[in-house]
Amino acid sequence: MVDPILWQNEARDVALIDIPRSIAAAQGTVQHPCHKLLLSNEPLRVPFPSNEPKSAAAKAKLCSGDAEQNLHREYASICVGALAEVKAKWSGEWCLPRPFVTGKLATKRKLDDERPKAQMTAMSAVQPSELYQTLLPESDDDGNSRILTVTDQGITPSATLVANLNERPIFLPVSGDHVAGADRYCVPPGSSFCLGDCHNARGFRAALRQQSNQQDMSKTFDFILLDPPWPNRSVKRTHQTAGSTYNIATNHREIEDLLLGMDLDMLMADECLVGVWITNKQAVRELVLNEGGLFDSWGVQLVEEWIWLKTTGQGEPVTPLDALWRKPYEVLLLGRRRRIDRTHGSNDPAEVDIMRRVLMGVPDLHSRKPCLKELIEPLLPSSDDYRALEVFARYLVTGWWSWGDECIKFNSGYCWEEPRAPRQSTN
């Protein structure tokens, strides 16, 4: 199995990663690796044409406050140094060969949330909503979640929570009169998923509690990762992210209520690591980090920031680092659950130096971020004995829990293809 991390420095604060291969690697184990290739889009060869405002008045409208501008100048400086470091050590393509869906990249710059019709049609056809209906059961009479546990002895009828306790991946067939054709979903070894609306935190916790009682497992997690459906004006009219069934929030209050309503702090182990992907809007950053924000409410302290820099196949940022309209990067905020003083019942408020890392990669399909499994494990108590949960997930990960109403989207067989056999030499 090819390592998705193409290059990483000794300090582990700069890395070049292949996004679709990082997801593929997370579908298997060393003993049972995944050899299939995840369908992606054609790698970008040149940066997007600029759509920056031309007039001074238009630029002034997009200019942010001093604090936000200073932050992005810091990010840009860090990215410049990271790019130089990789280019000095890496001479190959900045991504591995990838199979891609039908359709070419648009010749005119499209915003990240827009893709050519042929490409979007191909990927949306992968996951019609009807396919979920055969996996989503009706509630039991008592309102409890039902659990599908897959063992060597076979599987039971579909249920809200699916847990694969095998050392090998298993495949769930999906077919029925209301489904056009048949499909099957790969469930990686040791993974569990709860296919349902993230507004229904009560149902998720009930499923978690039931599995924990049956399998004598912990009810808390050492790592929780979220990629929330932040408000986005470019898809504001549809209230839905392109190619996704996750409805975007219409305003910050709505998404704040959703995230706080999940009571995720109840699922956090002592010193749990929490990662939240944010947009480049200052209001989103403040919602997470300000006093009374998400981290504060969860008892979490910021410890690291990961800058995911999107590049072309030749290592150029997809847009200028100082772009006003659309930055070439996104940021992951990583916080650590503050240690609770068991004697006095208070959190440790000690300040910490924020570690910043840069993760570079050629963009994949819209909203599909690199799988962080291999990169995050060194920060966890034990790389082979920890519990992780991804919220608003779009694919499953070996050994992790996934929660969301499209958490198996890219585990559909339609999203993968077998690697092509190498050509035989005619000499």
Image (tube, rainbow, N blue to C red):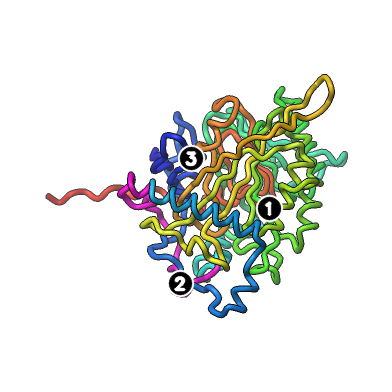
Q: Is residue 148 above or below residue 92?
A: above
Q: Using the rendered image of the protein, determine whether residue 192 is visible from the camera's viewpoint.
A: no
User: Which comes sooner in the sequence, label 3 or label 2?
Assistant: 3
Decide if residue 408 is in sight here: yes
The kind of residue tagged 2 is Pro
Q: Position of residue 51 (x, y in %)?
A: 52, 74
Q: Secondary structure at mark 3?
A: loop
Magenta-highlighted residues: 86-111
- Image position, residue 78 (x, y; %): 49, 49
Q: Are marks 3 and 1 in contact (CB under 8 Å)?
A: no
Magenta stretch: includes residue 34:
no
The image quarter containing residue 160 is: top right
* N-terminal label among 1 and 2: 2
* CA gap, disc 3 and disc 2: 30 Å
Mark 2 surroundings: few (<14), some (14-19) or many (≥20) residues within 10 A? few
The three-letter code of the residue at mark 3 reads Asp
Mark 1 is surrounded, within 10 Å at the Cα level, by few (under 14), some (14 to 19) or many (20 or more) other residues, namely some
Q: Which mark is residue 13?
A: 3
- In depth, the one of 126 and 251 nearer the eye is 251
Q: Is residue 220 above or below residue 140?
A: above
Tell me which residue sits at (75%, 34%) in the image.
Answer: 267
* Amino acid bearing label 1: Arg
In front of the other: 402 or 95:
95
Where does residue 1 sit, x and y in percent of width and height? 39, 38
- The residue tagged 2 is 49
